[in-house]
Image (cartoon, rainbow, N blue to C red):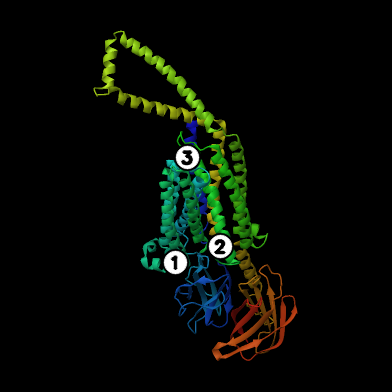
Amino acid sequence: MTPTIAPRLRTLVLLLLAAACALLAGAGPASAHAAVTGSDPGQGAVVDKAPARISLTFSEQVALSDDSLRVLDPEGKRVDTGKPSNVSGTTYAVPLHSGLPDGTYTVAYQVVSADSHPVAGAWTFSIGAPSKTSVSVSGQSADDGVVGWLYGFGRYVSYAGFIVMAGGAAFVLACWRRGSGVRPVQRFVVSGWVALTAATLALLLLRGSFTGSGKVADIFDLSLLGQVLQTKTGAALVSRLLLLAAAALFIAVLFGAYDKREDAQEKRDLTFGLSIGGVVVAAGLAASWAMSEHASVGLQAGIAMPVDVLHLLAVAAWLGGLGALLVALYRAPADTPVDRPAVRRFSQVAFGSVLVLIATGTYQSWRQLGSWSAFTDTRYGQLLLAKIGLVVVMVGVAWISRRWTGRLAETAPVEAAAVREKERVGAGNETAGDVDITAAGDGDAPAESEGDSDLGTDEHPGTERAAQLARQQAARDAARQKRMRDADPNRFGLRRSVLAEAGIAVVLLAVTTVLTQTEPGRTEQEAKAASSSSASASSDTGASGALTLNMPFDTGGEDGKGIVTIDLDPARVGDNEMHVFVERPNGRAFDIPEVKVEFTLKAKDIGPLPVVPDHIATGHWSANGVQIPMAGDWQVDVTVRTSDIDEVTVSKNAQIG
């Protein structure tokens, strides 16, 4: 049965890798983490007068370049002037040429969200009336294509490399210290370091093109690399490379001086030192992800980043240790088998890691989803459900492995049986040797001559032959021990269950990589709420002439996110009635300490004209007799205060009068 294991192992691993690559290929690396929650003019809007600027509101802060916001006329020529800028909070704008003719205009944007992911898209608006346009509005990000796929694959390899390196080293130090001298385990850990280092360098080179043009030719553009090094993501990748240099020293000591140390006290001291140093380096490497991705932005970032570090360390200890155990079970030499105490210690480490994963994963899920409905209504929630399902299955298989561990035969009886077998065979050889000698002594000249030829003419003719026989006997003993060890049904069962765990882990890692590239469910739902609200009443003037403006806000504090809606009726020169509504992203009204509104007509240098509405009901304020002195493109500024210190002003332009 044993000779068939290796081909099956290779086939299963290839299938799992293919499944992982399929998940990555279908991940859609353009998935954004900063969502567009509003624009002025809105998608498909038809305005009577050419706006002085266009603005775009995101769910979080984004990074801009000179070409982040582009406005194209019906012929495809740019009509924006100057650089895009942050006008308030998460709203960004770019000025336009004056006197733009009627027709349909295209607005294309490409920015980088605060958690390092590119966000791109496009929409159209019309002046006067819609017209034909030569501009193709694809809404695709520049990271779609070869560069995007390579970047996604690099992220997968970097996660896998960290898990293999950190988890494999932890398995050796915490569970199986004899493994520091086992060559397959050494190669396993070193391969993790090589994979993480190569992936980090590749991500540095790909980053500029990934967040920019998406062209393969720009991968080796040194000017783009210089820009990347000045970003938060670039700093994180460089920090990771520096920490990998320290990790190389750690690995060299672990598989060098540590393995050769024979004094028990010195080895204990070195074990303690390596454990402390290894935890520090591993935590630093994990922080290089936490400081630049999901955990670094949004709700409770100060808590989320340490939690994310703990989550990554627990994943490495469990999955990386599992990989090292699998290598030890299949590739360890016959004279250094992984024993039951080592497997039991790993079982305890894995159990502790799962508890940490449950605690940190629960917090991360709450932070990224925000509601139960997000589990089924958002892509992030659906992927998270798949991840949870894989973890549950993996824990079930681990429980089976634990049962096999409890019945795993100790190595001592196996070794004793091997010794008895060796003695029995050795006794038989001695008898056979006596017969041969007797036959030779009886005058068998040809046999004696052949024996002399085998022994040679050295001073000690039997020495070389004896050494050769000893090597052959040692090889036979090792093979016999391996056969006896592999014949143990409990060890064979443990091998199969651990192999199944490792296969699930490969797919789990792929789903996790996709998850980190997907827009969080909380953000997606907020964007949907803002879009649906805007679609129902987005700056439109109906028969009554009423004006409705919807503006998402985020003060940065607890319960600081929501949507403020301004209703102005009849939205004409003279007296107007104004109503202000404040809602949570899920559409539920809620009260805040203060809301103020100001009207400014910059073209005529009028304003700001302040209006302080009266509180009417939950989430509802109103004011009568709001005076609009003349018609024009008015800027409406709404200041929202959600606590004593959390305040933000959001703005939108509207044609009044």
Where disc 3 sits, the SS reads helix
Q: Disc 1 or disc 2, which is closer to the eye?
A: 2
130 to 626, vertically: above or below? above
The label nearer to you, 2 versus 3, is 2
- Position of residue 280 measured from the top left corner of the image (x, y, whole percent): 50, 57
Task: Give the residue pinned by disc 3.
Answer: 10
Tags 3 and 1 in contact by the CB under 8 Å rule? no
Q: Which mark is residue 212?
A: 1
Earlier-in-chain disc, 2 versus 3: 3
| Marks 2 and 3 in Cβ contact (< 8 Å) | no
Q: In what quadrant of the picture does the C terminus appear?
A: bottom right
**Image point (41%, 14%), residue name:** 431
Q: Which mark is residue 305?
A: 2
Q: Nearer the viewer, mark 3 or mark 1?
A: 3
The amino acid at mark 3 is Arg
Mark 1: amino acid: Gly
Residue shown at the point (44%, 30%) measured from the top left: 478
Q: Quadrant of residue 229?
A: bottom left
Task: Name the kind of residue labelled 2 in the image.
Answer: Met
Measured from the top left, where is residue 550 in percent x and y? 64, 75
Q: Choose the circle earlier in sequence order: 1 or 2.
A: 1
